[in-house]
Image: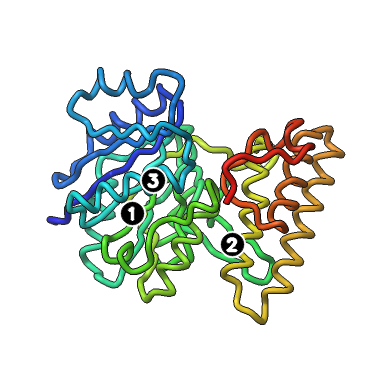
Amino acid sequence: MTSRVFILVLCHNGLELTLACLDSLRQQTYAHSEVLVIDNASQDGTPEAIRAAYPDLGLIRTGANLGYAGGNNVGIRVALQRGADVIFLVNNDTLLAPDCVARLVGALEADPRIGVIGPMVYTWDEGQLISSAGGAIDWWHADAINMGMGELDRGQYGARPVDFVNGCGLMITRQAIERVGLLDERYFMYWEETDWCVRVRRAGFSVRFEPGAQMRHKAAIRPDRLGPMTLYYLTRNRLLFFATHTPLPLKPVALAHALHGALRGAGHERRAGRAEHARAIQLGIVHGLQRRWGRVDEPGGQGAQAGMVRGVT
């Protein structure tokens, strides 16, 4: 295996998680790799701590919270300029098995048709509870599903083509990026990796899941543990994704399902006494219909009630 891999670790605060992630990357068995940290304006001393712990590590400070798409795009441009063959996007709240990168690269090099590949993602706790074993898109119901979420891994999910892989650990080839472009920054965060994978597949590449490569992700797998910010972006960007990519004959039905699901979710949150969560979903619907994308401030708070938005495009 000789592909030159750039591993991009995006962070916005989360100092202890970031350092733990970098330690797991330092233990990778794959030799031809370089780690580049992209810091999205952390306020907890993350850049300084990284400099102290890893003085030789590449570190880019964006100066603002550019989100998942914008922050990673900064790193992708640098990696491509420096001759990357493969780019591996890694969330800072992950831990990788020592052979994770090597197994992903090995699968890539064995099949040149692959444009994107992702590992088995387990939940943060010990054990083999699955967070994502590849993703599937339900165009009719306007949904995207992390396969296996909440199941114990018994080997039921083998290596196979999938519709998308989870953005917490997404490896993509230079050829795929050169053909389809960078992440779509309208999303800011959530759904952008699904959008990317769809574009890669429609460009003629395969998107694959590789269970032999493994990582852990510190993310909620239960909907009732999602915060207002997450609910806002999930709601709004779901509308953007399905309006953009759904085949024309299915688009009216898919968008109707997306709207109905969002309204039902807002009602559920309000009945559960989570008014801030309900407001965030409602604002996500409004901004989706208005085609207002990018970053917002306080989508579940008072600013959401007033419709205050910053940095939209």
Name the disc covering residue 72, or none: 3
SS state under label 2? helix
Q: CA distance from mark 2 to mark 1?
A: 21 Å
Mark 1: amino acid: Met
Closer to the eye: label 3 or 1: 3
- 301 to 233, vertically: above or below: above
Mark 3: amino acid: Asn
- 218 to 4, vertically: above or below: above
Name the disc covering residue 171, or none: 1
Asked if residue 225 can be seen in this view, the reply is no
At x 64% / y 35%, what residue is drawn? 297
Question: From the viewer's perspective, is 55 left or right of 195?
Answer: left
Image quarter of residue 289: bottom right
Q: Position of residue 125 (x, y in %)?
A: 48, 32
Q: Quick check: marks 2 and 1 in contact, CB under 8 Å?
A: no
Name the disc covering residue 241, or none: 2
In the rendered view of the protein, which quadrant contains the N terminus?
Answer: bottom left
Of 48 and 121, the residue lying toward us: 48
At x 37% / y 76%, what residue is drawn? 204
Q: Residues within 10 Å of mark 3 (few under 14, many from 20)?
A: many
